[in-house]
Image: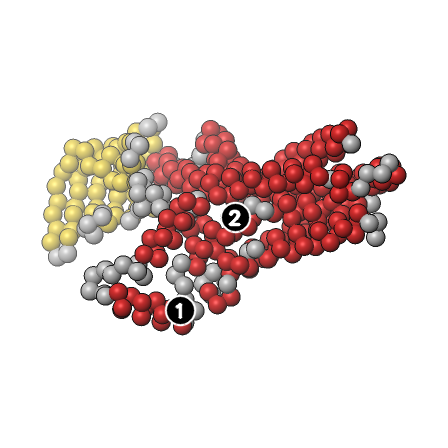
Amino acid sequence: MKTLHLYLTRQVLVTLLMTVAVFTFVLLLGNALKDILAMLISGQATLGGVARAFGLLIPWVLAFALPMGMLTAALLVFGRFSADQELTAVRAGGVSLLALITPILLLSLVMCGVSAWINMDIAPRCRVAFTRLRYEMGVKLAAATLPEGRFTSIPGGMVYVGGIDGSDLRDIIGCYIDDKGEDIICKAPTGRIVSTNEETTLHLYDAWVILKSGTESSAGSHSDFSIPLGRKSKSNSFEKPSVTDMTYRQLDAELREQEARFTTPTGDMTIDELYRLKGDLESQHVDPTMPLRVQMHRQVAFSFACFGFTLVGIPLGIRAHRRETNVGFAIALGLVLVYYSFIILGQSLQTHAEWAPNLIVWLPNFIFQAAGTVMLWRANRGI
């Protein structure tokens, strides 16, 4: 029995690594075509930046690739096991199917723990870091790709560069609206782009600047006048990520904060007025905290996908009785599509509290685990 367990576990692990690598590559390729490669071609990113972006995307796509890989591994390994009559030989030796697959089920539970760690912490953090990196690449674009001989859009206006000599710019004209709402028109014979950790600016030397504020205007020369091309956000965009990019702890803290708004009086509102407002929202089936609850339930529920996929994949692989890899991949993709459709449905209904979308994301787990248990019981009895 120990030899059989080691053999099956080794086969599943090898196939799992192969299929996870394939699905990770495919999902990474989709994100690369959408974001990274376009930025590389346009000159926004260097090869080092692209490598870093790929590294940050791997945990995000691994959250999806790991359950898909576990399902495909179960289908392929047990499909071959059945097609080669190895399962028949094992049964003839008096070993039941349930006793045979015990280590595989334990492995799927371990993968659930890994998935939970990725879904609830690693993937959201990497997604936020990727968003920040993509923003920084966009800032560098403004600094590195001001073409000569034509106007280029900048935040709040446009800049014209007559010529470029290495890092030096010539015959510069700029017109834009600054942070104070003032119209600025400037012209300089020379200039240079300077990028720091805080911002990217275009410095104009010996510039003539016309400033217009309302009905008043002024003009004067400046030995060094700077035009902001892009600022790196320090707090607004990245300290508080979107709901879909929050870790489980961040979601829980945000949920507690929002719930406290309906229990702690603020401003001129009394506690009775708060409860009345909460009752009005509930009567209209409006729950401001539901998107947070849906995301929290999705992260936890999605972590159990490996177990449900394994329960379904083993009997399906035995029933398919096929060695072909393409058949296993086709069945896996079909099941994954069914599973993810419930997740997408729950997220799309997150503003409709009356449908309990936070519970809908659990439905595929219940369905797959129940169906897998019945199918395993039937396969164990040879039905």
Can residue 127 be spotted in the picture? no
Can residue 274 be spotted in the picture? yes
Where 331 sits versus 10, above or below? below
Residue at 35% across / 27% down in the picture?
Answer: 166
Quick one: SS at disc 2?
helix
Compared across the picture, whether 296 is left or right of 177 comes to: right
Q: Quadrant of the N terminus?
A: top right
Quick one: SS at disc 1?
helix
Name the image quarter holding residue 207: top left
Label 1: how many Cα within 10 Å (few below 14, some 14–19, many 20+): some
Q: Position of residue 153 (x, y in %)?
A: 34, 46
Along the viewing direction, whichever of 216 and 285 lies nearer the viewer: 285
Where 368 sits versus 134, above or below? below
Residue at 52% across / 51% down in the picture?
Answer: 298
Q: Which residue is mark 2?
A: 300
Q: CA distance from mark 1 to mark 2?
A: 26 Å
Where 292 sits versus 303, above or below? below
Name the residue type under label 2. Val
Along the viewing direction, whichever of 153 and 85 lies nearer the viewer: 85
Comes first in the chain, label 1 or label 2: 1
Label 2: how many Cα within 10 Å (few below 14, some 14–19, many 20+): some
Residue at 50% across / 33% down in the picture?
Answer: 55
* Label disc, if present, on residue 282 of the rendered structure: 1
Which residue occupies the extreme front position in the image?
A: 94
Q: Position of residue 279 (x, y in %)?
A: 36, 70
Compared across the picture, whether 71 is left or right of 203 comes to: right
Q: Position of residue 263 (x, y in %)?
A: 30, 60
